[in-house]
Amino acid sequence: MDEFMAAAAIATAHGRLAEGGISIASVSAECGRIGDGGNHRRVRNGDSVTHANIECWQNAGCIGSYEDTILSSTLMPGYLRAGAVVQFGIPKASAGESATVPGVRQWMEFHGVEVVDFDLEECKQLRRQLIGHSPQLWNEDIGK
Amino acid sequence: MDEFMAAAAIATAHGRLAEGGISIASVSAECGRIGDGGNHRRVRNGDSVTHANIECWQNAGCIGSYEDTILSSTLMPGYLRAGAVVQFGIPKASAGESATVPGVRQWMEFHGVEVVDFDLEECKQLRRQLIGHSPQLWNEDIGK
């Protein structure tokens, strides 16, 4: 299941990149059903805070409880998305890589979240592609 | 400035409540300019993650840097909104009360955010009004 979801997130990121979007994406699954992939909306409509995971959950709508939810992303969440994982009680998060977000994994684990880091070169490449093509976007995203 | 922003957040919450929305609201200010008030969008369109502050920043659009931004809310942010404050480097957050969100103030302070809690009975009343009228909404919001 974890590997399948990681592959779905990667495929979504490649698809969005091909459409002129950015190369970070998330998918979520509730009770085994894969939800819509999320993507950074900022490039399209000037929305600075609707990150990949956030859009992913917006697409899912109100599900009442997140206790059967798994989140899979190409890049380890920053504190905005990790904060949502902790606040909503999402029990598991997986990421394709985490090189640029030190500390967030440990913080989620401290709050009882199971975290998996696949450490995939393909996901590092997707992130480098974003930083190379849109350094200002990346810097704003990390508060620089 | 702090008191003025708190009053603006409270006025926004009362206004939204009168319109049939919910009674928690935020305003942000950048360089002294008060931004649009945010409100929970979920009641209106089934969006489970666009919280008051999040919508507030969405309304503000891309501002490049948040280093001159102050956030003021009727209720202390949970980890979703606090995560955004930390990730984007917002230096100051004020809240009308914080009775139901233990630990979040300390976590933001650990990350260098200046936090003010006005501990206002009016804001506690607004929060109790929300819990009393919409307990399911409140529970979902805190991951219960």
Image (cartoon, coloured by chain):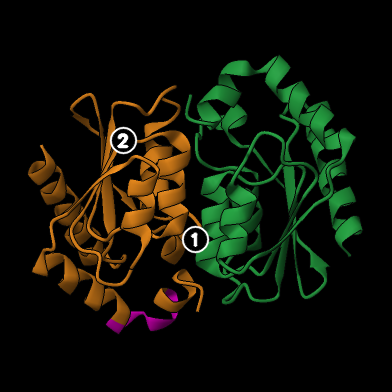
Chain colours: A orange, B green
Q: Give the amino acid type for the residue marked by disc 2 in the picture.
A: Pro
B86, B5: nearer the viewer: B86
> So how many labels did they put on this image?
2
User: In the rendered image, is residue A106 in sight?
Assistant: yes
User: Can you give x and y, in whole percent of width and height, for residue A23 in the image?
Assistant: 26, 65
Is residue A53 in the magenta section?
no
Residues tagged 2 and 1 counted as in contact (Cβ below 8 A): no
Looking at the image, residue A74 sits to the left or right of residue B95; the answer is left
Q: Would you call the spot at circle 2 few (<14 residues within 10 Å), some (14-19), or many (20 or more)?
A: many
Q: Would you call the spot at circle 1 few (<14 residues within 10 Å), some (14-19), or many (20 or more)?
A: few
In terms of image quadrants, where is residue A124? bottom left
In terms of image quadrants, where is residue A43? bottom left
Q: Tell me: residue A37, above or below residue B124.
A: below
Q: Residue at x 73, y 37 (%)?
A: B24
Asked if labels 2 and 1 share a chain, the reply is: yes
Q: Tell me: residue A91, above or below residue A133.
A: above
Q: Quadrant of the N terminus of chain B?
A: bottom right
Q: Give the amino acid type for the residue marked by disc 1 in the picture.
A: Asn
Q: Which residue is mark 2?
A: A91
A30, B122: nearer the viewer: B122
Q: Residue at x 31, y 79 (%)?
A: A131
User: Can you give x and y, in whole percent of width and height, for residue B130 in the image?
Assistant: 72, 24
Q: Which range is magenta? A: A132-137
Q: Secondary structure at mark 1?
A: helix
Alpha-carbon span between mark 2 and mark 1 = 31 Å
User: Can you give x and y, in whole percent of width and height, for residue A132 in the image?
Assistant: 28, 83
B42, B91: nearer the viewer: B91
The label on residue A45 is: 1
Main secondary-structure element of the magenta-colored stretch: helix
Looking at the image, residue A15 sits to the left or right of residue B8; the answer is left
User: In the rendered image, is residue B58 in sight?
Assistant: no
